[in-house]
Amino acid sequence: MIRFGLRLTLAGGREAAVRLIVITVAMALGVGLLLAALAGLGGVSSQNDRYGWANSRTAAGPDPLRWQLRIDGFDARTIGRVDLAATGPRSPVPPGIPRLPAAGEYFASPALAELIASYPAAELADRYPGRLAGTIGDEALPSPDSLVAVVGYSPAEMSQRPGAWRVGTISTTAPTSCPGGCWSGIPTSGLQLILAVVAAALIFPLFILVGTATRLAATRREQRYAAMRLVGATPRQVGIVSAVEATVSAIAGTAVGFALFLAFRDAVAAVPFTGAPMFPSDLALTVPLVLSVAVGVPLLAAAAALVALRRVRVSPLGITRRAATRPPRAWRLVPLLAGLAELTYFVGRRPSTVDGQILAYLSGIFVVMIGLVVAGPWLTMAVARVAARRANGTAALIAARRLASNPKAGFRSVSGLVIALFVMTVAVGIMGSLSADRAEALNALHSADRSVLFTIFRDGLPAPTGDPVPAGLDDQSGVRGNAVTRRPPADLTPPQEALGDWGWPTALVSCADLSRMTSNGRCAPGAGTAWVYNSLQGPESWNGVWPTAAISPDRLPSLAVDSIVTWTDGSRAALEQARTTLALAHPMMYSPYTDAEWNAEATRTYAGWQRLADVVVLTSLAIAGCSLAVGIAAGLTERKRPFSMLRLAGVPLRTLRRVVALESVTPLLAAAAVALGAGLLAAHLFLRAQMEISLHPPGLSFYGIVLGGIAASLAVISLTLPLLRQITGPDAARSD
């Protein structure tokens, strides 16, 4: 029977070839996207693990290195830097370099080496004393454009370096916590949760498309299978033939999907979904992943085909003698309500582990999607019955009656689009709410002062006293002034009065220094020292007068430094030269930064998440469009004999076209309204449970996209209407 099924599939004429091509293309598109999402789950972990070596803190090991992690910056880009010194011949070597750099040598990533060669030495190269000994290999770089340096010093110099520690074993995994600060990417847990949801969002519309494509010419095949039963074929043999047909298409589509993934893997890896591009090798196809997709997808497709064509297993006459199907019951709403109830349960009960979060939210969203598909026929029937009672035309009455008698068939053609609308609503709802939640921070970034550098002494180590401003900094081109804030002595208590929404200031500054700086605050008349924040900036809802401190300005140099605030003209040259001078004078973990740079990395990451949401929305809509077109075409093919009989009875062709349009639009609009509501509610529950924020109502652009999608769906429906003239001729009305 397998050989017979292969013959019917591969040599069954033009109709079988079209069906094979449609299912293959659908499977290829879905499998390629599914592989990208599943490979991305491992790629996120691999990328984050390559941050691990720089955050090494294990002292155990022979000849431990003197080690200091530093996070530098250049032109709003982050530079990961490790200063180290070998203490013996057995000192460990970080990945990506052939040997440890000697004092006066450094290794740089290719992107950093290119930057160093492209800009004046005073802006970047002078931060790395000595000569470039070589480039760092990919195994130590989180992404191809990462800026990374490993700089060699003498043991004597590193032993005097504040903030340095001993490292005897190089870490190979990303840190799970950073109490003292670390250089890292986006937490793996959050991205894996997002990509797991993406995989589910892609796979569900895909299998709806496969099931819909399987229905192409289903009536003809059901009659063929019934004929096989009449000549003695058992239900098992008929099932084998139908499964072979679906499996062949699925295997072909899966193979093409693997080819598409490999062909576009480099392009996918280059998209900075995590805030930085990946290496193509990060999107590796592991053996378990290949086996699960290569075996699982064809099996699921075969199961979908068997379910779609299960009617032939009733009896040999089960196709010719059709009995009226039972109308859908209200119990079909239960899965939808159960999925929403599951998401509701986890509000205030967020699982503590990533696996728990994936299981909680992914299963809830998946059950909601299943619930929409299960409840769709009942919603279609309910709307059709109302429409039948209010129908005032032939086309409307025929369409309503047909939908009420077989709502499953009516909903089947639009089910893919309904799921796509749900996925789009969830994605837009979550990303839009995150955008609204971050609006204040993003607005602050756009209005942030890019001309002021902040050097904060926060390593938890003794801060310098005296004058910490490096010699010559005041005279550098583009530097307008410097001010030093101090930590108060033990006998001086900060004023316990909040300034606006920020709490009370805890740093001291000389009013003479403050007068030369850019600040939205000023000293009280006659004051010599003021209480300030270490950035010299105050909240907007504040009167602008800093509290006066009861301490003489002459005593300030004896106090520990809290920060150095450097005001420049905002040019790249002035900022980077000042940063170089300050970083050389004060080699701390965090180099001087501006307000704009502090938020730039998070903004790039957020933009990557938005791009990911856009990909999910566009892909699900594309799959849904294909599903809609195939579903309507399959429905027309199945109904060509009844429509031919109506044409022979004198019903005009334009009336039949209105019937088809109404049969498609009615379930589409009814289920779309439920999908939008369920999507917004699911997004709200996810945001409340995972991020403890509420859903922000989508803007007009979202509803514009929804209306545009519905309009595009109507256009797809209209494109299938010309098929009526071809399939409703007199020959189609003939009984076989």
Image (spheres, helix red, strand yellow):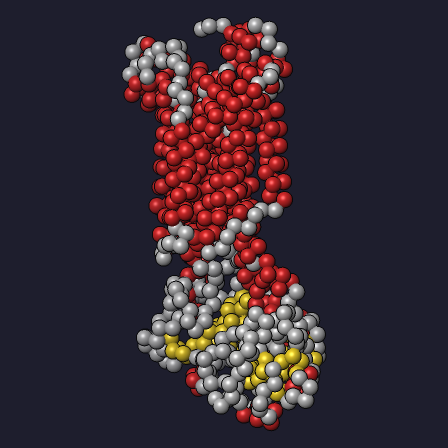
Q: How many marks?
A: 0
Quadrant, the C terminus: top left
User: Residue 314, relative to residue 141: is it above or below?
Assistant: above
Q: Position of residue 351 (x, y in %)?
A: 36, 54
Camera-side residue of 28 and 326: 326
User: Residue 143, relative to residue 482: is it above or below?
Assistant: above
Residue beneath the point at 55% across and 85% down: 486
Residue beneath the point at 69% across and 71% down: 571
**Which image quadrant for residue 317?**
top left
Residue beneath the point at 46% across and 5% down: 735
**Which image quadrant for residue 461?**
bottom left
User: Residue 39, relative to residue 641: is it above or below?
Assistant: below
334 displayed left or right of 524: left
Q: Position of residue 628 (x, y in %)?
A: 53, 29
Camera-side residue of 380 and 312: 380
Q: Position of residue 438 (x, y in %)?
A: 56, 58
Residue beneath the point at 47% across and 76% down: 83
Residue 120 appears in view: no
Q: Position of residue 442 (x, y in %)?
A: 60, 60
250 displayed left or right of 585: left
Quadrant, the N terminus: top left
Residue 146 appears in view: yes
Q: Residue furthest bottom?
A: 554
